[in-house]
Image (tube, rainbow, N blue to C red):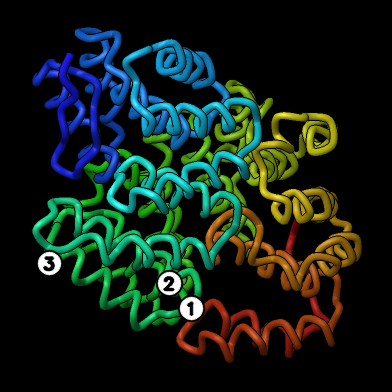
Amino acid sequence: MAPLPDSLGLITSTDDPLSLEHFEQALASLFRGDGNALPVIERAIGRDPGFAVGHCLRAAALVLDGTDACTAALATSVAAIERNSGANERERRHAAAARQWLDGDVARAARLYGDLLGDYPRDRLALLVAHSLDFRLGHRDMLRDRIARALPYWDSRDREYGYVLGMHAFGLEETGNYDRALAAAHKSLELVPDNAAAIHVIAHVIEMRGPPDKGIAWLRGTQPIWVGNAGFRTHLAWHLALFQLDADAAGDALSTYDDLIAPQLDGGNNGLVDASALLWRLQLYGTGSQWRWREVTGLWMRGRTIGNRAFDLVHAVMALAASKQHARARRLAKRLESDTMLRARSGNEELALAKPLTAAIMSFCRGDYDGAVESISTIRAAADRCGGSVAQCDLIHLTLLEAALRGHRKRLARTLAAERAVRKPASRLNRWLKARAWTLGTARLAT
């Protein structure tokens, strides 16, 4: 069997051109984030069970998926590479990195994929997985810098170059380099006009800066692109609803939920996180919806919550508590201490925030606003390291402010509201929160 080099110099242990073609198709799907990679690579592995780099790709796709339901298939691919005497050094290093994730050591997996990328900066699989794990672990500087280190080895002749620019743009945005993030994202879209990831970066920059009307126009204008991308359509609909809520249009946000988010919920964690986070923000706004919460809670409980990340479990607890299922919420929150796989697959800072945050959420839903304030106050300084993006972590700040408002903590509420208004003065939501803080002393919102 003669090893064949692919277009980026990756040596692949196969003599089947069709398997290599399927590999390229599946890898292109991973870069697009459209959710179609696994069926394609399964066909290649079905034709050629010894296709080591095909198993590397399947392992990478399953690590990117990140759910406990993937472990059996991931173990199969890792074992297939390990026992394949024809597998080369890079393929075996991919297997070693994936095995660390399989064994629950996400930080070690990230290091090994990162080491691979350091030695082979044009290794597309290592690039994708290391970038994703940097995000999950809250390593925002590495989210920017790891891609920056690889970029000199890429240029516009590479068909994935636009996607790599989009990845770098996200790292720039998450570290507050908004102008450079916009430039990189727009360049990415010039090269790859349907890159939903770059559309996502621009939405993030507008979310950080405002005004919300600009964000609504951006996502409505690009909706024909992202609405067909299974990996981004729910999350970008979530961003659209956030802009609508920020524009004081809660009814529009609810319509976005009903039309674009709820129909896509299939029990996958990412969609349920977005659904829970949006319904929670609407509840903070005073637009609660018990029947929507019950639907989301049913989907959380139908799936497997053992072994999920702490970030995901927080949102499942949120759904239970908001649905008034307080005992079940408390039982689920205890997994932050008892679920060893969850603890292994969560970043240290993510774990440190999760316990007081779930306590705050449960207190808030019981009407104990002072308890919610006390719990969140212990983690407020580190809230942006919750396990998600800066935009996702803002839920913590919003919850603290709303608890202060409902608990009539006038001085704290005014301080928090003033900070938000200064950071994003174009936000009508922030202006509403500030006005409420300055007129405290009348009625409370219903819990």
Image quadrant holding the C terminus, namely bottom right
Q: Which residue is mark 2?
A: 173
Q: Quadrant of residue 196?
A: bottom left
Q: Residues within 10 Å of mark 1 (few under 14, many from 20)?
A: some
The amino acid type found where label 1 is placed reads Gly
In-image side of 435 versus 357 (left or right): left
Viewer-closest of 185 and 225? 185
Q: Amino acid at mark 2?
A: Glu
Residue 2: image tag: none
Where residue 166 sits: x, y (%)?
A: 29, 61
The residue to which callout 3 is attached is 190
Q: Provide residue 156's location: percent of width, then percent of height.
A: 12, 63
Residue under label 1, please give it. 176
Query: Where 188 falls versus 366 (above or below)?
Result: below
Q: Are marks 2 and 1 in contact (CB under 8 Å)?
A: yes
Q: Where is 223 relative to 217, above or below?
A: above
Residues at badges 3 and 2 in contact (C-beta under 8 Å)? no
For the N terminus, give its image quadrant: top left
The residue depicted at 43 percent of the width and 27 percent of the height is 92
C-alpha distance separating marks 3 and 2: 18 Å
Left or right: residue 400 versus residue 191 is right
